[in-house]
Amino acid sequence: MLDNRATWSDFRSRRPELAVLGIGATEQHGPHLPVGTDLLAVDALARQVAERLNAWLLPPLPVSLSECHGPLGGTVWLKPATLAAVLGDIARSLEEQGVRVLVVINGHGGNFILEPAVEKLNRTLSSLKVLLAPESLALLPGDSPIFATADREVHAGEVETSVVLYLRPDLVRPPRPDGALSVGREFLDYVTMERLNPEGVWGCPGFADAEKGRRAFAARVEAITRYVLDAVQWLAREGHGDSG
C-alpha cells in the first residue's frame, strides 16, 4: 500500500493502478461523539480496504455536505457542486498518473451528490473508472444481526457510537442521550437537525458497545473489498479497463 509517507520515486517504481479515497465530514454528533466522527471512521475504513487491495491510500476529505447540522456547533460544510468538483479534480489528476480505478468510500450519509457525480465521471473520463463503494452493512452468511436499533438509526445513534467505541473509546463521552424520532429521515430535507432534536441525536446510542462496532467495521471492510475486486474483474472482462 502507498500513502502520504511515500516519495514520488516510490510511486514511479510501483505505479499504482488503484486508489482509495474516503470522504468524511465535520459536523456535530450529539454531546457524546466528536465532530470528526465520520472522518475518523472513514479514515480507518479506507486504510483497511487499501491495505487489502494493495492500493494507493489518499488522505480523506474532512468536509462534505453537512449543512443540515449547521446551526449546531462544530459543523462545516461544502455545497454539493463543490464536493462534485473536488471529486472530479482528484479523479482527473489520478487519471493523468496512470491510475485506472478510484474507489470512493463515503463516510457521511448526506452526500447525495456522489452518485450522480460518479456517474458523470464514468461517462467522461477516458481511462479511469470511479467506483462508489456500497454503503449498506453486508453481513457474512450465517452472521446474526449486529444492531438492535438500526431501523431507528440516522445520526449519532447505536451504529456510529459503537464504531467510535471500537476505534477510539477515549473520544466517547457521557451521557449518551437517545433521540428516537417519529418522522422519516427525509425531514432533514425540510428542517435542520436542531429543530428535530436540539441534542443533535437521531437514534439510540445507549445500545452501543465496542464489540458491535468491531463486527460492523470488519463486515464493511470485507464487503467493500469483495465489491471492488468483483467490479474490477467485471470491468476488465467487459473491456472497460485492464486493472486487476
Image (cartoon, helix red, strand yellow):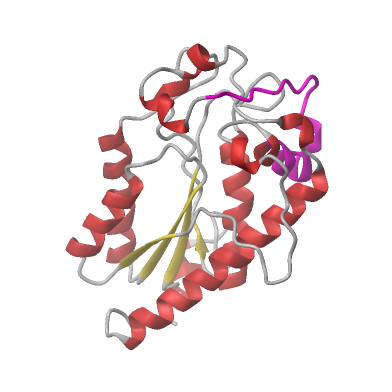
Quadrant in the picture for the N terminus: bottom right
Residue drawn 49% across the image and 76% down it: 229
- Please say whether residue 235 is one of the residues in the magenta stretch: no
Instruction: State the count of labels.
Output: 0
Q: Position of residue 39 (x, y in %)?
A: 57, 39
Out of 125 and 113, give the one closest to the viewer: 113
Looking at this view, name the residue that lies furthest to the front: 182
Does residue 85 appear to the left or right of 99 in the view shown? left
Q: Position of residue 196 (x, y in %)?
A: 51, 16
Please say if 170 is above or below 122.
Answer: above
Looking at this view, name the residue that lies furthest to the left: 124
**Which segment is the magenta one?**
161-182
Q: Quadrant of residue 235?
A: bottom left
User: Does the image show residue 21?
Assistant: yes
Does residue 15 appear to the left or right of 198 in the view shown? left
Out of 180 and 110, give the one closest to the viewer: 180
Residue drawn 54% across the image and 14% down it: 73
Q: Position of residue 155 (x, y in %)?
A: 58, 31
Q: Position of residue 154 (x, y in %)?
A: 56, 34
Residue drawn 26% across the image and 57% down it: 119
Residue drawn 60% across the image and 41% down it: 151
Does residue 12 appear to the left or right of 31 in the view shown? left
Does residue 108 appear to the left or right of 45 in the view shown? left
